[in-house]
Image (cartoon, rainbow, N blue to C red):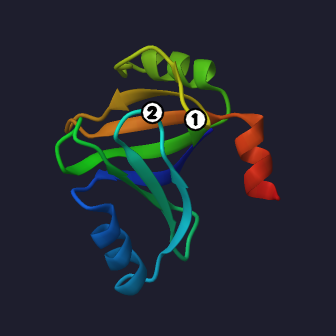
Amino acid sequence: MVKAKYITMIVNNTKESVDYYCNILGFQVDSVYHPPGNTEITLMRGPSETMIELIQSSQFPTGLYSIGMDVDNLEETIKEIEEKGGKILMPPAATLVGRMTFTEDPNGVRIALIEHNMDYALKKEG
């Protein structure tokens, strides 16, 4: 099962972006991560299940980065996509909250496919 979960944007200034999404659009900060390197990841939660992920990093150009989709089983999802003629852009990789890979739609929009680990799932339930 594939479920749209978040939109990822690369931003120039996390504080300005957080202020905009909180004060103008009514989102709230869900969590903030500081992975190795000079990167900050802020997850914003709105009135629905879909979240916005803001990443401030000099490694990527500013703008839309990807649409994130949760999957129950990453290997099965990859197999299904490839069997249907879709392309996987990279081998599965470990993240702070699970494992992921990317596919790309016909317009070049990157779609992150992520299988969350149990620690992440339990944190979100509790």
Q: Amino acid at mark 1?
A: Leu
Q: Is residue 48 left or right of residue 82?
A: right
Say if 125 sits above or below 110 in the image: below
Quadrant, the C terminus: bottom right
Label 2 environment density (alpha carbons within 10 Å; few <14, some 14–19, many ≥20): few
Label 1 environment density (alpha carbons within 10 Å; few <14, some 14–19, many ≥20): few
Whole-angstrom CA distance, mark 2 to mark 1, is 10 Å
Q: Amino acid at mark 2?
A: Pro
Question: For this rendering, which residue is in front, 71 or 23?
Answer: 23
- Residue 27 x/y as whole percent: 47, 76
Residue identified by numbered label 1: 96
- Residue 12 x/y as whole percent: 21, 57
- Residue 67 x/y as whole percent: 38, 47
Give the residue at x 18% y 50%: 62
Circle nearer the N terminus (2, 1):
2
Q: Is residue 108 left or right of residue 46?
A: left
Mark nearest the camera among 2 and 1 is 2
- Which mark is drawn over residue 36? 2
Quadrant, the N terminus: top right
Give the residue at x 51% y 61%: 50
Question: For this rendering, which residue is in front, 33 or 107?
Answer: 33
